[in-house]
Image: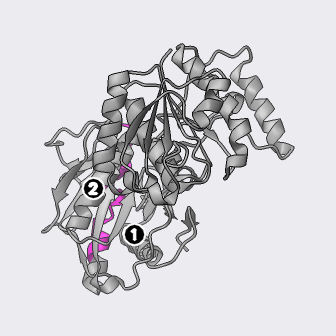
Amino acid sequence: MFITALPTIAQMVGTNRILRGVAITSPTGDPSLAAGDEHDLRVAIVERALEMLGTEVEPTTIWELA
Amino acid sequence: MTIVHYVNQFFAGLGGEEAAGHEPIRLDGPQGPGRALAAAGAAPDVTLACGDDHFGEHEPEALPTLLAWLEEVRPDVLICGPAFGSGRYGYACGVLAREAGRRGIPVVAAMTPDSPGVMAAEGAAYVVPTGSNVAAMRTVVPLMAGLAVRLAAGEPVGSPEDEGYLPRGLRSNVRSDRTGAERAIELLLAKLAGDVRTEVGPTGDRVAPAPPVPDLTGVRLALVTEAGCVPQGNPNQLPTRHANVWLKYPIEDVDSLASGTYESVHAGFDTTVGNADPNRLVPLDAARELERRGAFGSLHDAFYTTSGVDTPVATAAKFGQEIAAELLEARVSAVVLTGT
């Protein structure tokens, strides 16, 4: 599965499991958050990624974090 | 002009299914549909034929035999089929077309658009789409002959839309008398009217979604990135753009991609935020935490990286295949890939 802040481009090239990342410059982080909160966010992102890996999907499916 | 024509056992007059195991054979002059090609102005000098089953089952022997004959004759153009909806015949046409094309011989083939031969040809041939049965012969032969004669003469061939062949996944420069702005507005207006067109078709191939990993608790998970993450100082000199390599770095004893120990050398985005905490690019710290919690089996002992900037699709596909092969070997069954 692929985490990216440019999900429509991933879709265009045929990626099947796409999770929308936070930003182009930090797909798995948010520098505007306090360090602890950002870490929690990142854990939530990877948890969501794992959930997507365990889920049957249609071609080029995009998931949001929540 | 020298033309070679490839057909299967049936169209070469060798027999039907009972002759599908026929070995490659070289015949003089036009056979079967080759006569229609001749009538349309593209008379084959030599006909090569092979049984469909034989080609499918003995490709490593049959293909070199056919290619050796092609090398001998050195035709100005090779014509394959039409194979219509026959999957085995289409496949043989597509493989031969690809290999001949790579050897500098122009190729025209014909088959249904969903034939496995279209993919096998990998854009190396001009493939004219046909209906699924021989009834399409009358319309497709003149198209094939016309293309073949022009290719043999070294004349330019127009776009797939204008010429009626399937897109080959190539782009060519053309001079237009209208500006990009004019053409873009025209496309937009057409789209608003429900007619979706493009000047640049998608070239990515479509792969069916991998089946879900049913139980993550036993799974070995790998982290892969195109964000250009490397150990600080870029010890293996990963190119910052136009990367021609991917690299892997051990993370067996690493819990987090700490700033100052890892960095991104990717030239396609501002790396300030990523370099302040490279876990924002490759979420190692979070993956470790989830590994400890038992959310999945274990993390693979290395992460894979390249910088995806100005990377041709073909290069990216090659990297993907190489990395996937290595991960499969290491019994990794799930991957989290991050992109910037």
Nearer the observer, B319 or B275: B319
Residue shown at 43% from the left, 21% from the top: B75
Please check the rendered image and state whether residue B281 is part of the magenta-colored stretch, yes or no: yes
Residue B1 visible? The answer is yes
Please identify, in this view, whether the residue under mark 1 or under mark 2 is nearer the observer: 2
- Residue B174: quadrant of the picture: top right
Q: Residue at x 42, y 39 (%)?
A: B96
Instruction: Tell me the quarter of the picture where residue B32 sits.
Output: top right
Taking depth in this image into account, of B163 and B175 the one nearest to the observer is: B163
- Left or right of residue B312: residue B137: right
Image height of B260 relative to B153, above or below:
below
Q: Which residues are magenta?
A: B267-288
- From the viewer's perspective, is residue B314 above or below residue A38? above
How was this image coloured?
Answer: one colour
Q: What's under tag 2, amino acid-wise?
A: Ile
For the residues labelled 1 and 2, the Cα–Cα distance comes to: 25 Å
Which numbered circle lies on residue A42? 1
Note whether B334 is above or below B1 in the view shown.
Answer: below
Residue B62 locus on image (x, y percent): 33, 45
Badge 1 vs badge 2, beta-carbon distance below 8 Å: no
Residue at image mark 2: B323
**Relative image position of residue A36 (x, y in whole percent):** 36, 72
